[in-house]
Amino acid sequence: MDELLARLPGLLLGVVLVAAVATDAVSTLVTTQRRSGRWWPTYVFYRRSWRLWRALARHIGPDDARERLLTVYGPLSLLGLLVIWVLLLLIGWGLVWWVLADRLSGVHSYLDAVYFAGVGFFTVGFGDVVPVGDVARLLALVQAFMGLVTIALVIGYLPTLFGAYSRREAKLLTLDDLTDERTSPTGLIRAWHADGGLDGLAAAFADWERWCAEVFDSHTAYPMLAFFRSRQPGQHWLTALGVVTDAAAICLAAIRGARAGPALRLHRRATGLLRAVRMLPAVSRAAPGPEEERARAEAVFQDIYRHLEGHGVPLYPYDRAWESLGRLRAEYVPFLRATISVLLVPPEFRNHATPLPLEDQEQAR
């Protein structure tokens, strides 16, 4: 009796550990509303492992080699998370069986208890350790059921996760401003405006608003998706989000009547998405950009302002439009810059479509 009382804290610790890991797994894989906590296994695992992985990547010189290493992290982290869950569950169940060693045949130490926990968890059933009594047999069934459910949830989780990833990435392949250079907000505005005037711009913004809404839903339900890199070199969902949101902000600031249309909705969805990425470690508002960055941004804005003005688009006065653009970008650029820094995202977005021959490009113009 005295020995059982001495081991009672171990029993309580084991039960709490098993319950915490099971709750974390269900919260990650099943529930529709996540309740994030700084000490839940999933949060701790991604926080610590990404910091180590990022530190390693920053010491790799060639960009291609760094990107290959970062690409591996997302899929590998899922396997690592499963391993962490299983190890913690085995430790917890090992504590439970160690306290109940008198209800098991062949358990003489904590390692023996962990061994029996593993055999039951994976439903191997060698038979060298057997539970004795109704309570022990019932607990063995509960443990085996938990093992089956954990593995089944992870396996069933993968198609949903990779389906959301594929839908996100397929949309990136359509982000094309019809140039052979990096895709830019001004290039997109020119291309979309040439495709249908203001209606063409509105249709493009509405299309990307739907993409933002889907990414918001999938990345808040499954935050680890933020760590999945694009299959295509030079592309990333964050830089794509930045490009289309900048395009929407420019139109909102410059074009009369744009604040009642899809550009405003896209800006709101994108800003909400950037603020909702909570799983990433150490993401906070970044410092404002240097003066030369703002000077380059104004030069780009002047160019697209003159382009729209030359096509008869109704515009606000330049000074008012430039000031409004600064306020709009301040709502999302700090969060975008900070997240890009944490994820080591390439600064540019490039489309890899095959360019037209030179003479066909001249005819298109």
Image (spheres, rainbow, N blue to C red):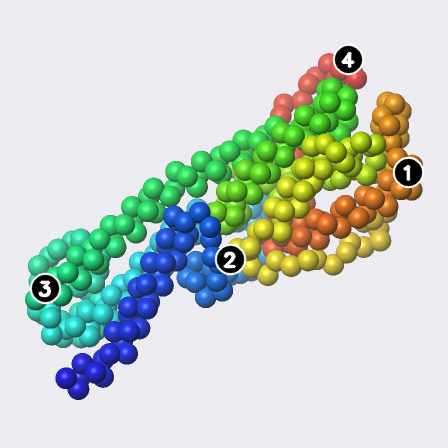
Which label lies toward us, 2 or 1?
1
Which residue is tagged 3? 134
Image point 34% across, 42% down: which residue? 156
Chain-order first, disc 2 or disc 1: 2
Say if mark 2 contacts mark 1, CB within 8 Å.
no
- How packed mark 4 is, by other alpha carbons closer than 10 Å (few <14, some 14-19, many 20 or more), is few
Structural crowding at the residue carrying mark 1, measured as other residues with C-alpha within 10 Å and reported as few (<14), some (14–19) or many (≥20)? some
- The residue that mark 4 highlights is 363
| Mark 3 residue type | Asp
Name the front one of labels 3 and 2: 3
Question: Is 11 situated left or right of 198 in this image?
Answer: left
Disc count in the image? Answer: 4
Please give the label number shown on residue 50. Answer: 2
**Cα–Cα span, label 3 and label 4:** 84 Å
Q: Is residue 5 visible?
A: yes
What quarter of the picture does the N terminus occupy? bottom left
What residue is at 60 percent from the left and 38 percent from the top?
212
- Return the disc, 1 or 3, that comes first in the chain's sequence: 3
Q: Residue at x 56, y 59 (%)?
A: 281
Residue 357 place in picture, x, y as percent: 70, 17
Residue pointed to by mark 1: 318
